[in-house]
Image (spheres, rainbow, N blue to C red):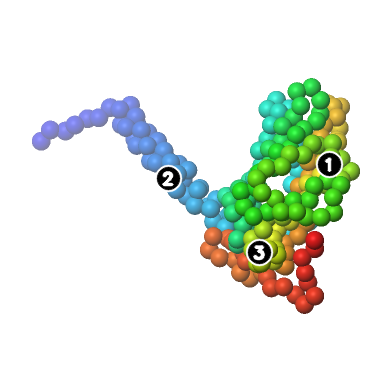
Amino acid sequence: MILLIIPFALNFAVTTAGVLALVGLVVLFYLLIVRPAMLIRADREAPPPEEGSVREIIVDPSLRALKLSIGQIDSDLKTRMNGIREDHIVFRFTKDRELEDYEIQINATGAAQIRVPHSKKMENFVGMERLHSSELIGDSAGFRLVASAREGRVNQYVEFELTAKYFITRAGDERMKFLLTLKKIFPSLDKNSRNKKGIYTFGRVKLGQQVEE
């Protein structure tokens, strides 16, 4: 019988390498499988959108441009509503090179309506619209993501309002920020209708409830 004598240093190195390899596999499994699954589950179980919720938009001055989309569940701002498309409405904010002024380009890829600043009426929105940030100071623009319409009349939609205001940074600089507010889910949101993907359906029209023109 031949006895193999393994040096302690070699034994320690092999054991350490095995432990590190096992830890690496566990970390890799967590990052590639467990964590994405947890994020998807958390997203699906997220609460429904609430009327009155506000999204602040501040453009990084070093980039001078920012793109933000509103859609169902894969867009930047999630409505989680049935009938809404992904990237239903897309905003692109572009800053002037010298001034704290912005051009806002809005593209509609789904059925939509728009109310431009200084107007009280919603109009059908197809294609692209451009606004200037100065129009949104003290006023607002409205956007309806239409989920359902019949005979030319909208009967299900999610409405947002966009406005702008100045603020002072910690460095004492005057900057502009945009406020995107979820104004209305019409006719309502059925909180008991969430499916496995985390999407909700619209509620029923109540007696006397009608679309505001």
Residue located at (85% from left, 27% from top): 173
Amino acid under disc 2: Phe
Q: Mark 2 points at which residue?
A: 29
Whether residue 213 is visible, yes or no, is yes
> Split into 4 quadrants, where in the image is the C terminus?
bottom right
Which is in the foreground here, disc 2 or disc 3? 3
Which is in the foreground here, disc 1 or disc 3? 3
Q: Name the residue under label 3.
A: 149
Tell me if label 2 and label 1 are in contact, CB under 8 Å.
Answer: no
The furthest residue to the front: 151
Give SS at disc 1: helix
Reading the chain from its start, which is encountered first: label 1 or label 3? 1
161 over 61 or under it: above or below: below
Amino acid under disc 3: Ala
Which is in the foreground here, disc 2 or disc 1? 1
| Residue 72 lies in quadrant | bottom right
